[in-house]
Amino acid sequence: MKWGVVVFPGSNCDHDAYDALSRLLGQEVKYVWHQDRNIADLDAVLLPGGFSYGDYLRAGAIARFSDIMDEVVTFAHEGGTVIGICNGFQVLTEAGLLPGALIRNTSLRFICEDVPIRVEHTDCRFSASCSTGDVLKIPIAHNEGNYVLNDTELEDILAKGQVLFRYCSPGGEINDQNNPNGSLHSIAGVINESGNVLGMMPHPERRCDPILGSTDGRKIFDSVIKWVENNGKR
């Protein structure tokens, strides 16, 4: 597979993502500058974490209007694989590729810690290497990770299986005590209705190297690679 890691002014997890995909997963990867418009040669696009355009106005609001996002939207509508991590998730909601929005954590503080997340189902390209109910330990690092949407939208994404990851206890229980940012329904990651776009606040790229004590994040990237091998690019 050939991956593109988008670089916005203010991205700070682009190198982490590049390293995880290239060195640890053996993938072909290139950086894609925010003013680029040529991604036709890619099989997957990753929007990394950071503070695109300084997170002015609100997180992801300016990046949504960058040149590259016109191409990412088209790429996604044509069935291409897109992953948005942390700030990348925020950009995807601003671009309308995913429902809902990300607002300030209920604590009103930046949170940086390892958290357990539960895999809700494996019927998509981002969780094919997992089992339903698996608990992955993945770090978060965000100030605006509180996922919100209205009641109708929530019912809709639940009915369509678009909730892919939820914050949980180490044993997999869903409760307020193990919801780090106040996200509605403890949602940590969602997919679009077609199942080819994923947005998640936790950072799987930071848990791919055994030297960091866990490779749980690798399962998400392995899932995409496995899916493409079995089903083709789009």
Image: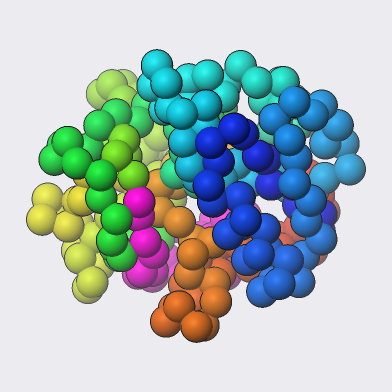
* Range of magenta residues: 120-141
Query: In the image, residue 214 lies at what x, y percent?
Result: 44, 78
Return the residue nearer the eye: 221 or 120: 221
Is residue 80 visible from the viewing direction of this image? no
Return the residue nearer the eye: 211 or 125: 211
User: Does 157 appear above or below 216?
Assistant: above
Q: Residue at x 35, y 51 (%)?
A: 141
Image quarter for residue 112?
bottom left
Task: Say whether residue 63 is magenta.
Answer: no
Image quarter for residue 101?
top left
Q: Residue at x 20, y 65 (%)?
A: 169
User: Does 80 appear above or below 92?
Assistant: below
Quadrant of the drawing holding the N terminus = bottom right
Q: Is residue 124 left or right of residue 68?
A: left
Q: Residue at x 36, y 69 (%)?
A: 137
Q: Give the residue furthest to the right.
A: 41
